[in-house]
Amino acid sequence: MNKNPGGAARNAPRTPAGLIFIRPWNNLQYVTNAVFLLTVHSDLLAALGEPLRCTVDEDADTSDTGGETAADVVVRAEEVLAFAKTQADYILGTNPMETSYLVGYSDKYPRRVHHRAASTASFADEKGFIGCAQGFDSWYSAGEENPHDLVGAVVGGPDGEDRFNDQRGAYMQTEACTYNTAPMVGVFSRLMELDAEERLREQRDL
């Protein structure tokens, strides 16, 4: 959230468009898990009626926070959740590539996911035996889109400059992992719940 006094060394790195960026290989695993924890923690803070307090050493650089001291830096529960939502929105397509990194969501999402079953023809189309070597030789380097969409998978995501290469060979970006997707189940459930609550309040105010 860039709230810690002390400059970049004390805050999580970001891409130019604001995505948390830890490393090039499957960066979204860190984003999705961080977003899950932030979402849960925002509910905890709200229940306790307490803000998040960012404290650092007294000699830390505070130039990037307007000269605030460590005791001055507090973050409300709603700010924590709002930041988590920006990351979720980025994953769903609010990003420079206008690409959803959740496969199957929106009109533009990765079509060449690095996944053997998704990228290999089905038995209905190709009756011959396809072993490991044949699958690699025939499909891994093929430029065509996968014959099967791996719906619900969250891929590795963009690089540190918000760029994404939708090719199987770019596996650091296109590989799908269960531990990318799993945390977002809870996040999306919570955000949908909040949206439903907001709509209910609007209906009551009519």
Image (cartoon, rainbow, N blue to C red):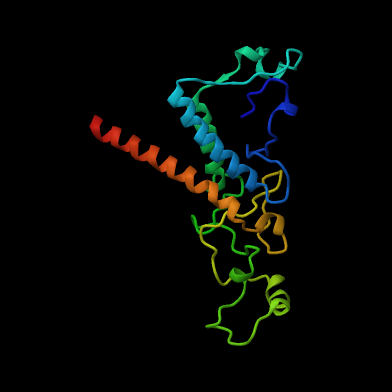
In x, y percent, where is residue 63? Answer: 72, 16
* Quadrant occupied by the N terminus: top right
* Quarter-of-image position of residue 38: top right
In x, y percent, where is residue 52? Answer: 55, 22
* Quarter-of-image position of residue 161: top right
Q: Is residue 114 visible?
A: yes
Identity of the residue drawn at 72% across and 74% down: 136
Identity of the residue drawn at 65% across and 52% down: 156
Q: Nearer the viewer, residue 103 or 117?
A: 117
Q: Nearer the viewer, residue 6 or 52?
A: 52
Identity of the residue drawn at 51% across and 38% down: 85
Identity of the residue drawn at 59% across and 63% down: 111
Q: Is residue 82 visible?
A: no
* Quadrant occupied by the C terminus: top left
Q: Nearer the viewer, residue 168 or 161?
A: 168
Q: Is residue 130 above or below residue 108?
A: below
| Left or right side of 115 for 182 | left
In x, y percent, where is residue 23? Answer: 73, 44
